[in-house]
Image: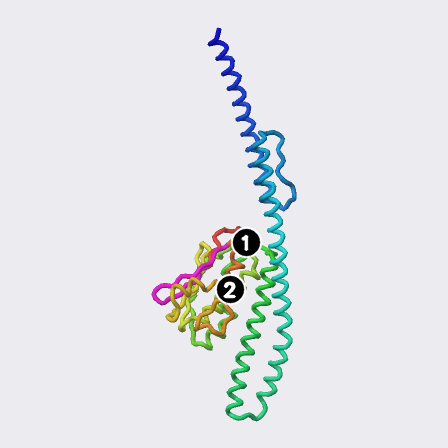
Amino acid sequence: MLPWILCGVLLIVLVIVIGRYRGLCQGLDEIAAQLGQRLTSDTNNVICLTRGHARTRRFAAQINRELLFLRKQRLEYVSGDRELKEAVTAVSHDLRTPLTAISGYLELLENEEQSDAARRYWTQIAGRTEEMKNLTEELFRYSVLVSSESVKPEAVVVNKVLEESLLGCMGAMTARGMQPVIEMPALPVIRRLDPRLLGRIFDNILSNALKYSDGDLTVSLSEDGVVEFTNQAKTLTPVMAERLFDRFYTVETARHSTGLGLSIAQLLTERMGGRIGADYRDGRLTVTVMFHEKCEK
């Protein structure tokens, strides 16, 4: 008789354990499903359990506290980030007016009779003022680009946009004695991109090439949507090349630049689902832009 009683007790205990185990699993499954939704959506809703063990409910309550704290932190970050962008935009815009006035007075002063020392001072002031104007303009453009998330993709022939960018800077290349080598496929390379942003990417990279090149430039476009800009740049190092996309980073050979051109190009490339990078080997700098996802006409 006793063995049967023990078996009955063990059976009851086993049923209870299995029931609690199933309740625990169901509670954890609910937590996992709802947690994924809460993390990927902008909502104030917390995790609610319809079943589960008391410990599972305490675990859910702890997660809810962390979710509320995380949401609070996110809202503070978004608010602060927006305020910072608006401040940069406002400051860069406000700097334009006095800089324009200074440039105007410098132009008037240029026509006045000056001593050799005064002419040297005027040259330094004019050069620094022009640098400030360029920096202010790039800051303004960068703040606008960062604050705007609108991308208007359409079927774009990358060959055509690249050709237009090359034609746009051909005068500056000729002035520097550069004869670019251009390699493009006969067939059009079509991608779904924003043509305006794509042109800005190419313009910024070509502008960078003009700053760093020792006099040569090779531009190639492959059928796979890979664009490479290669030039001699003996004054660079691999470490410098890796930092070219850092905001405001400049090197001695580009001391008149703002350090925002390639940073903007990286921002726009990634915004359209592409990749961009720089490689420095044997004295040659290569900036590569990739848009692999094809688009039919």
Quadrant of the image occupied by residue 48: top right
Tell me the residue at 62%/69% (across/down): 91
Residue under numbered circle 1: 192
Residue 137 marker? none
Circle 1 sits in a helix, a strand or a loop, which is it? Answer: strand
Residue 11 visible to the viewer:
yes
- Pick the front one: 289 or 240: 240
Place of residue 219 in the rendered image (x, y in percent of width and height, measured from the top left): 43, 64
Say what amino acid the circle numbered 2 marks: Arg
Q: Residue furthest front?
A: 2
- Pick the front one: 184 or 54: 54
Tell me the residue at 58%/44% (across/down): 66
Q: Viewed as shown, does residue 179 lie left or right of 76?
A: left
Q: Which residues are magenta?
A: 274-288
Q: Residues within 10 Å of mark 1 (few under 14, many from 20)?
A: many
Circle 2 sits in a helix, a strand or a loop, which is it? Answer: loop
Mark sitting earlier along the chain (2/1): 1
Say what amino acid the circle numbered 1 marks: Arg
Residue under numbered circle 2: 247
Residue 220 visible to the viewer:
no
Place of residue 234 in the rendered image (x, y in percent of width and height, measured from the top left): 37, 70
- Pick the front one: 190 or 6: 6
> How far is disc 2 from disc 1 in space, using C-alphas?
27 Å
Place of residue 292 in the rendered image (x, y in percent of width and height, measured from the top left): 47, 52
Tell me the residue at 49%/74% (across/down): 256
